[in-house]
């Protein structure tokens, strides 16, 4: 009977080491998202050619006479055109006698990546403990509340 405490301790150690692993679900999975934006730098290239060109209206322009005292003036009608420039990254509408940008549509490239991170399990715990231990020269039972720390996870 003197070896009974040692046998119980060995059985408890074997049970703790070889116990079936239980899979715990983390109650709330932490999900973080990362947005990656590709930056496109300005590259000086050749002058773009308009995809579409149309005459919208004409603008009367009076030509000044360089000779003083001459009253004959001539009127020239200048066309007001609208041009559309198109590329894979933009569509631009330009119009006018002195051309100005009416509108532009920019198609930016944005790539979104989702990165999932699992929440770390807590290693410290507080709970009811039952065991058998040695106090001095004497072995005795132990029942109580204690703080625990998980050294291994499987």
Image (cartoon, helix red, strand yellow):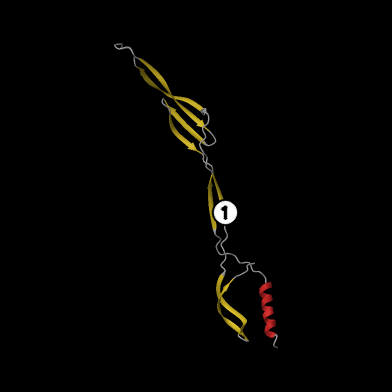
Please say if 100 is above or below 2. Answer: above
In percent of width and height, residue 139 lies at 63, 85
Q: Please name the residue shown 37% across and 20% down the image.
A: 61
Q: Please name the residue shown 45% across and 34% down the image.
A: 103
For the view shown, which residue lies furthest in the bottom direction?
1
Please say if 4 is above or below 100. Answer: below
Assign a secondary structure to mark 1.
strand
Q: Is residue 10 left or right of residue 145?
A: right
Q: Is residue 154 left or right of residue 45?
A: right
Q: Where is residue 79, by image quadrant?
A: top left
Q: Is residue 87 left or right of residue 102?
A: right
Give whichever of 11, 103 is nearer the camera: 11
Q: Which residue is mark 1?
A: 115
For the view shown, which residue lies furthest in the left direction?
69
In percent of width and height, residue 108 lies at 51, 41
Callout 1 environment at 10 Å: few (<14), some (14 to 19), or many (20+)?
few
Q: Please name the residue shown 67% across and 84% down the image.
A: 5
Please say if 150 is above or below 31. Answer: below
Q: Please name the residue shown 57% across and 68% down the image.
A: 123
* Quadrant location of the N terminus in the rendered image: bottom right
For the view shown, which residue lies furthest in the front direction?
136
All told, the count of numbered labels is 1
* Quadrant location of the C terminus in the rendered image: bottom right
Give whichever of 112, 96 is nearer the camera: 112
Please say if 118 is above or below 21. Answer: above
In percent of width and height, residue 65 lies at 34, 14
Q: Where is residue 25, by image quadrant?
A: bottom right
């Amino acid at each position: 009977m003197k070896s009974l405490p040692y046998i119980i301790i060995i059985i408890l150690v074997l049970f703790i080491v070889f116990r079936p692993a239980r899979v715990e679900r983390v109650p709330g999975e932490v999900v973080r998202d990362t947005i990656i934006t590709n930056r496109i730098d300005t590259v000086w290239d050749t002058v773009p050619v308009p995809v579409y060109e149309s005459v919208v209206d004409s603008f009367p322009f009076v030509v000044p006479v360089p000779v003083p005292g001459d009253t004959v003036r001539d009127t020239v009608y200048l066309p007001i055109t609208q041009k559309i420039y198109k590329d894979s990254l933009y569509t631009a509408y330009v119009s006018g006698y002195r051309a100005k940008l009416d509108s532009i549509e920019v198609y930016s490239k944005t790539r979104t990546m989702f990165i999932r991170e699992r929440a770390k399990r807590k290693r410290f715990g507080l709970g009811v403990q039952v065991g058998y231990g040695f106090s001095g020269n004497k072995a005795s039972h132990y029942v109580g509340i204690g703080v625990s720390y998980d050294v291994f996870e499987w």
